[in-house]
Image: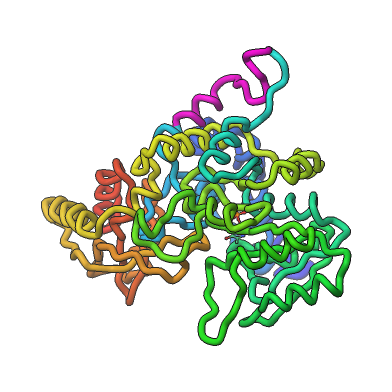
Amino acid sequence: MTEPDAIVRARLRAVPKVDVLARHDALSPARRSQGDAAIVRAAREVTAAIRRAVLDGGEAPSLDEAVRAVLASLDAARMARVRRVINGTGVLLHTNLGRAPLSSSAAARAADVGRGYDALELDLATGGRGRRGAFVEHALTTLTGAEAALVVNNNAAAVLLALTALASGRGVIVSRGELVEIGGGFRVPEVLARSGARMIEVGTTNRTRLADYERALDEHPDVAVILSVHPGNFRISGFTEQPSLSEVARLAEARGKWLVDDLGGGALLDLRELAGLEGEPVVAERVKAGAHLVCFSTDKVLGGPQGGAIVGRAELLAAVRRDPLARALRLGPMPTAALEATLEHYLVGELDAVPVLAMMRQPADDVRRRVEGWQAALAERGVAVMVVACEGRVGGGTFAEEPVPSYALRIACETLGADDLARRLRLGEPAVLPRIVEDAVLVDGRTVLDGEDAALLDAIVAAMTPRS
Ligand SMILES: *Cc1c(COP(=O)(O)O)cnc(C)c1O
């Protein structure tokens, strides 16, 4: 045995044993909060890492250091839990932050249904089987003028289901200008391929004419569906052309084909009138323009829980419902309850109860006054910040570039760079996600929800206070 071998062996013997490490007293609180299996797993990973480091010529750490490594690994696992974040980005529908926050009654209804049994599929009048989502369907048809509706897990699921049910094994015509990728890897050609339909591209990236659709219909007798996709998160400008939805609808009608509209956003009301936001189509108008089915997210501008709605012709929705995929993609009871409550706000006109609508509608001056209030409160606690005008966005694949005028706290720290300060805010309790603009940390007031003010100020003070 050579000398280095002997040293390595001695060091390997000094590596803490998994069971000794896992049973260490300092891990008792973690054992109570996270369970024994997680501790043993972390201890196993830490000892394996130490052993690898020793074989690479490193020293074995002390037992205390190994315990700290176990705690760090447990912390890292817990950090990955879903938890509340204060949204200081100014992006109202932030896909990485769970999109739309729920109204308090929507959140309360979801929690109430989650805690008990519910009549999700029971008709209480007859005691027989009822239909999941019947009220949501009733509300959506009332609000959109469509004959029928169905909700599933998200809009990607809605589009996949609609195409599978109507066009599997047949052709689907889509304009090349609409072959887009929406955030989160939703690519129209891939979803189409998954549905079992054959994609027939027409037109060019910037220009598609009605005649392009007509020619494709002449050439491909197996076409079942014309798909229209609203590319909300990107714009082609300049030399462009795309027939209106009603023109395409008339063509589809004349040729006995179905027009499916992937609308994305799902505005139930005219957001131009409501909030001065241009360019987001209203579901009811798409139905009126002649789309046979319209698919949209319930957690984008609609402002509800994650879900995807399909509204349109009753006979088509009957076919969609019969497809086995419908069962696989169905919405659970908690989001169903939250969506019901959200739609009830629309039915009775309580628009400011829906947080996304309230945030869109809030005048910039109101945001400024609120942010100035934070500035004053922080000054009293010895933290100096500035108030600056800024621009937020709606986000969520809608109005991608449409700026939403707003105001923000501009936070700077003498000892920390913007990235470090932002990191501290993210890792604080509660977590705060700011925006970094030109090396400054901004907390946009528009997306900080009612009731989060005190927690936000505490989090800023904590992030600015040097740790000893
Ligand atoms: C957002 C969007 C989708 C995906 O919807 P999810 O609810 O995120 O699944 C699909 N199509 C369009 C046009 C969209 O804007």
Residue 112 is one of the magenta-drawn residues: yes
Q: Residue at x 53, y 72 (%)?
A: 234
Q: Which residues are magenta?
A: 108-126
Up/down of 56 relative to 164, above or below: below
Give x and y (percent) for residue 340. 52, 34
Pick whichever, 137 or 244, lies toward us: 244
**Magenta residue check for 36:** no
Q: Is residue 424 visible?
A: no
Among the 4 quarters of the image, the one containing residue 36: top right
Q: Going 30% across and 60% down the picture, which residue do you hit?
A: 443
**Residue 468 placement: quadrant:** bottom left
Query: Foreground: 124 or 182?
Result: 124
Pick out the residue farthest to the bottom.
Answer: 239
Q: Relative to residue 75, is residue 396 depicted above or below?
A: below
Q: Image point 61% across, 82% down: which residue?
A: 206
Residue sitting nearer the eye, 388 or 338: 338
Q: Is residue 289 left or right of residue 198?
A: left
Residue 48 visible in this rendered orientation of the protein: yes
Q: Quadrant for ligand 1?
A: bottom right
Q: Position of residue 352 (x, y in %)?
A: 34, 43
Report the residue at 38% width, 62% height from top: 277
Q: Position of residue 207 (x, y in %)?
A: 63, 82
In the depicted structure, whether residue 169 falls above or below residue 335? below
Q: Is residue 36 above or below residue 390?
A: above
User: What is the x, y in percent for residue 94?
Assistant: 47, 57
Q: Quadrant of the N terminus?
A: bottom right
Question: Looking at this rendering, what residue extends furthest in the front direction?
Answer: 254
